[in-house]
């Protein structure tokens, strides 16, 4: 099979059968031939794999699946998807939340930033601004702001939203290095990706990620019921953030 698409989007899925909008994925792929989806089934115990298999069967030119027989966690599921996309040599590689809390049409906007600004990474950011529809529950919003501020200090980057599940990167030797080994954390792997970027760029003498990445303020983001992230997970996140600090600083 010859892949002509420029951008691969990894979609990690664990027991998402009630939240996967199959028609939206299928329709978006039909209208955007430059995008390729890689669905990673992370050992789901519901009908998720059957749904993914159906979608990929409907458009094998733009969709494929990777099946983890046991649940390995979102971090490793995303990493396995990236390894597959890197092997297939896509120009851009990113990951997206399966529930589409960030609309699929943002993929094009973020990819345009990569091309226009000549950067290596661009991320969605959930910023409550006039004219933006950011629907987050108050408790999670405020806990998220505290966490994001701490993560920014640990990373040494003026980043607003480390945890938004909409990130796209230019495929390169840097990206391959970052995803070559399993992450040391399970929950906040997004932060570890950025920490690894910092180390690799510094070792290559390229400079800080701050000079090579941008955040894109989302016009719309919706909280989808059924999220597996709970308020107590912020405690786990704090522990993992300290682990990242010790590992990479």
Image (cartoon, grey):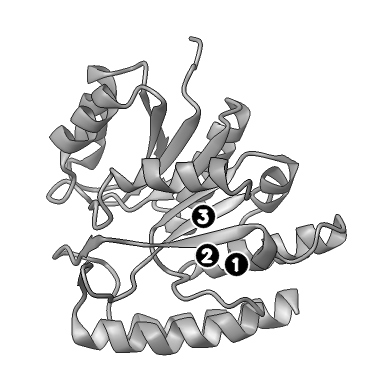
Q: How far is the residue under mark 1 from the one under mark 2?
A: 5 Å
- The percent coordinates of residue 87 (x first, y second) are 62, 29
Q: Report helix, strand or loop for mark 3.
A: strand
- The percent coordinates of residue 86 (x first, y second) are 60, 34
Q: Report helix, strand or loop for mark 2.
A: helix
Of the 4 image quadrants, the one containing the C terminus is: bottom right
Q: Is 24 on the left or on the right of 176, as rendered?
A: left
Residue at 21% over, 29% down = 26
Q: Is 79 on the left or on the right of 219, as rendered?
A: right
Between 69 and 225, the residue placed more toward the observer is 225
Q: Report helix, strand or loop for mark 1.
A: helix
Residue at 23% over, 27% down = 55
Q: Residues within 10 Å of mark 3 (few under 14, many from 20)?
A: many
Of marks 3 and 2, the one in the foreground: 3
Q: Report the residue marked by disc 3.
A: 122
Q: How far is the residue under mark 1 from the one under mark 3?
A: 16 Å
Q: Is 115 on the left or on the right of 106, as rendered?
A: right
- The percent coordinates of residue 215 (x first, y second) are 48, 63
Q: Report the residue marked by disc 2.
A: 189
Whether residues under marks 1 and 3 lie with C-beta atoms below 8 angstroms apart, the answer is no
In the rendered structure, which disc, 3 or 2, sits on the residue that comes first in sequence? 3
- The percent coordinates of residue 243 (x first, y second) are 63, 80
Q: Report the residue marked by disc 1.
A: 192
Whether residues under marks 1 and 2 lie with C-beta atoms below 8 angstroms apart, the answer is yes
Residue at 61% over, 86% down = 153
């Amino acid at each position: 099979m010859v892949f002509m698409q420029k951008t691969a989007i990894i979609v990690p899925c664990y027991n998402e059968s009630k939240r996967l909008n199959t028609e939206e994925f299928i329709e978006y792929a039909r209208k955007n031939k430059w995008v390729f989806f890689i669905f990673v089934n992370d050992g789901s115990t519901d009908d998720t794999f059957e749904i993914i298999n159906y979608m990929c069967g409907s458009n094998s030119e733009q969709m494929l699946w990777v099946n983890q027989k046991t649940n390995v966690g979102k971090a490793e599921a995303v990493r396995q998807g990236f390894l597959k996309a890197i092997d297939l040599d896509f120009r851009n590689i990113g990951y997206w939340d399966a529930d589409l809390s960030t609309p699929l049409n943002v993929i094009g906007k973020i990819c345009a930033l990569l091309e226009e600004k000549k950067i290596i990474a661009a991320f969605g950011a959930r910023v409550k601004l006039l004219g933006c529809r950011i629907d987050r529950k108050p408790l999670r919003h405020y806990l998220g702001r505290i966490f994001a501020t701490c993560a920014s200090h640990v990373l040494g980057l003026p980043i607003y939203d480390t945890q938004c599940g909409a990130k796209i990167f230019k495929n390169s030797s840097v990206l391959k290095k970052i995803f070559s080994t399993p992450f040391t954390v399970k929950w906040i792997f997004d932060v570890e990706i950025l920490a690894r970027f910092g180390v690799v760029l510094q070792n290559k003498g390229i400079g800080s990620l701050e000079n090579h990445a941008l955040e894109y303020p989302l016009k719309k983001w919706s909280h989808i019921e059924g999220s597996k992230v709970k308020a107590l997970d912020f405690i786990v996140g704090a522990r993992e953030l300290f682990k990242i600090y010790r590992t990479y600083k």
